[in-house]
Amino acid sequence: MNGRPARAAPSWARRQGLHSIRFLTALRSRASVPTVFRSRLIGRILATGPSPTGKWEYVTSSKQDRKPRVRHDVVRSTIRAAQRFELSSVPPSEDFLRSFAASLPASYRANFDAAAIAAHARIARERESAPANIGAFFSNRAPGAAVCVVADDRPGLLATISAALVLCGLDVIEAEAYTRRIPGQHDEAVDIFWVRHEDPSDHRLLLSQEEIVQLCQTVIGLIEGKLERKRADPSSRPSLTPAAKETVVRFIEGEDGTFATLEVETFDRSGLLLSLSQALFSQRVQIVGSQVKTRGGRVFDRFHIVEFDNKPISPARRLEIQVAILSAIDPIPEDNEALSVQA
């Protein structure tokens, strides 16, 4: 490219054993590679692609072919984490990456770096006509395994994904849901989850490839109606926490004056996201975006919701939705002074 011959990864990378596409994954760590070198090399890797022999070739210059002064323990830990994930043989094209990022909200682009966006784009591209596709990606934003779910956006999708997570024995630590607007096509949901195994004795931080495949098949089975979600029904699962206390459910006014954001703060328990998303679906509201965070046993959730016909939530409907959420968290006791419903 540009008259320069393609050659192998730089010497410092070869000494770390980076002879394959995993070298691109290792570039995700800002601490391990100089910024100028990383940006130039990633652009050239994406542009050149794999060689006819199937091995990746890297175009660089001797000026940047030098070993950065870094802490080796950081590099090795980054490499070990990156090698856990299987990457596609061919990364998304630069045009697809650009259109993928542009079709998502600005908040998405602000929350994820270029490497994560490229991983999400790969998952979206590989979905093709399938009902859903799921893949893991490297992230140190939250503990647990980071997975991306891409599917056609529809009412109740978050509840469906949450049911699949419960059926696969996974708990949600954090989550973010985004809607991808594609001109002339159906809207696409790009939902990100940081999950852990529900079994407290299972201390694995990452998911195996078999678990990713099982989760994807479960989501597709629920979407197509081939699987029943009775085992994931919150009413059939014992609660791991006592009656709800210090629970706050409120609507937040947006910049346009509408109350489209529902905020929920309560104690964490297994399957809570499923309970909340099912309660919203039963109230015939659609989740167009969400943020889920767990801190110190407390859950802080925000749901951006509209009616099924995309109209804003009316004042008369807000109280109904708040009561439904409180009932989903835990049946309202007679003495409900500890529960707070804020308009």
Image (cartoon, grey):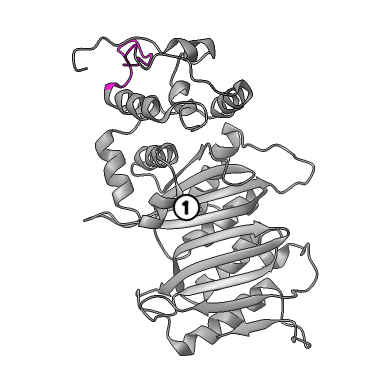
In the image, 89 versus 48, the foreground residue is 48
In the image, 109 versus 325, the foreground residue is 109
Residue 54 found in image quarter: top left
In the image, 75 versus 135, the foreground residue is 75
What residue do we see at 34% from left, 41% from top? 128
Residue linked to disc 1: 191
Element at badge 1?
Answer: strand
Where residue 13 sits: x, y (%)? 48, 15
Q: Is residue 179 visible?
A: no
Q: Amino acid at mark 1?
A: Asp
Q: How many marks?
A: 1
Compared with 242, 70 (above or below) is above
Residue 322 found in image quarter: bottom right
Q: Is residue 338 visible?
A: yes
Helix, strand or loop: magenta stretch: loop
Can residue 340 be found in the magenta stretch?
Answer: no
Q: Quadrant of the image for the N terminus?
A: top left
What residue do we see at 73% from left, 60% from top? 297
Q: Residue furthest left?
A: 3
Compared with 81, 283 (above or below) is below
What residue do we see at 60% from left, 75% from top? 325
Where residue 76 sits: x, y (%)? 60, 22
Where residue 313 sits: x, y (%)? 43, 81
Where residue 97 sits: x, y (%)? 31, 40
Can residue 58 be found in the magenta stretch?
Answer: yes
Is 133 left or right of 229, judged from the image as shown?
left
Compared with 104, 148 (above or below) is above
Q: Quadrant of the image for the C terminus?
A: bottom right
> What range is drawn magenta here?
48-62
Residue 299 found in image quarter: bottom right
**How packed is label 1: few (under 14 Cα within 10 Å), some, or many (20 or more)?**
many
